[in-house]
Amino acid sequence: MAGLFISLEGIEGAGKSTLIQKMIAYFEAAGKEVLLTREPGGSELGQKLRSIILNAEEKICPAAELFLFLADRAEHVESCIKPALAQEKVVLCDRFIDSTVAYQGYGRGMDVKQLQMLNERAAGGLKPDLTIILDLDPEIGLARANARNKAENLTIREGRFEAEALEFHQKIRAGFLALSKEEKRFFVVDAKQNAEAVFADVCKKLQSFL
Ligand code: T5A
């Protein structure tokens, strides 16, 4: 597959959506075609799954939660990501396999090795060429996300994880940092900086992919 596959990861409110918009403009200015997508919810089936998975009022046991994320991923890779890469597009994906390891593994306490095997099965062995981890203190991330939700009048319908205790988000941050040491594809950015400084750091890394 000849395209470029980049995933963005981090805790709630770390600034992934904000950064992705700048990355789209960066790649388009370089003449690349970009697919912006996300998990959960990148495919048609995924949109239906997303409304179930993230609804804080829907009771779901941890194993069911995991398999919903994996079902979303399998469909997303097959119907959206692989075709876009085959068309040589740049695929920018807001969360991918590493969110499962960080949230269901480090957060919910599931076996990390087993999750990595399940991820491989769901994603058909596909891994990003580059994974940007926006590293941030969860207190700051949650405050940013809550302020954004309030400003945009968002309801609890997508708040399953934002409703978790601070300790849960601290475990997830630690999980992403542990993961970042395992493979060369990871690039950790200090997301405490303002959005322009975050983007400037990322641009230095992106130059080698153009
Ligand atoms: N999940 C997902 C799992 O548990 N397992 C899995 O396998 C997968 C795939 C998805 C949830 O599902 C979980 C993880 C998540 O909890 P989501 O709705 O997609 O949920 O939520 P998030 O991905 O967490 O997205 P958020 O919108 O909460 O965070 P972002 O996109 O990181 O943050 P963003 O860019 O919207 O920024 C938040 C606010 O901060 C401001 C922005 O303007 C915005 O108001 N901001 C900054 N402020 C100051 N300085 C900066 N540098 C800033 N950058 C942004």
Image (spheres, helix red, strand yellow):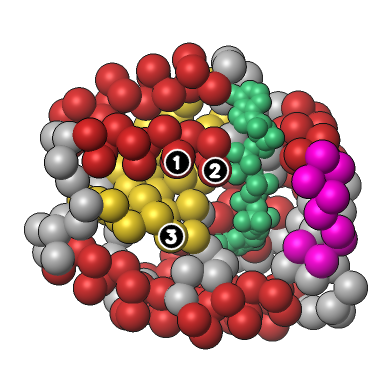
Q: What range of the chain is rendered magenta?
A: 150-158
In the picture of the structure, the residue carrying the numbered disc 3 is 37
157 part of magenta stretch: yes
Give the Cα separation between the discs numbered 2 and 3. Answer: 10 Å
Say whether disc 1 or disc 3 marks the residue closer to the N-terminus. Answer: 1
**Residue 31 screen position, x and y as percent:** 15, 41
- The secondary structure type at the circle numbered 2 is helix
The quadrant where ligand 1 appears is: top right
- The secondary structure type at the circle numbered 1 is helix
Q: Is residue 106 left or right of residue 206?
A: right
Give the Cα separation between the discs numbered 1 and 3. Answer: 10 Å
**Residue 6 screen position, x and y as percent:** 33, 48
**Residue 134 screen position, x and y as percent:** 53, 33
Is the residue marked 1 within 8 Å of ligand 1, measured from its CB?
A: yes
Amino acid type at circle 3 is Thr
**Does the CB distance between marks 1 and 3 fall below 8 Å?**
no
**Does the CB distance between marks 2 and 1 fall below 8 Å?**
yes
Question: Image quarter for residue 167?
Answer: top right
Is the residue marked 2 within 8 Å of ligand 1, measured from its CB?
A: yes
Mark number, residue 20: 1
Amino acid type at circle 2 is Ser
- The secondary structure type at the circle numbered 3 is strand
Say whether disc 2 or disc 3 marks the residue closer to the N-terminus. Answer: 2
| Residue lying at 64% horizontally and 73% vertically, measured from the top left | 50
> Can residue 7 be seen in this snapshot?
yes
Mark number, residue 17: 2
Query: 73 above or below 149?
Result: below
86 part of magenta stretch: no
Graded by Cα atoms within 10 Å as few (under 14), some (14 to 19) or many (20 or more), the crowding at tag 1 reads some
| Residue lying at 31% horizontally and 24% vertically, measured from the top left | 203
In the image, 184 versus 197, the foreground residue is 197
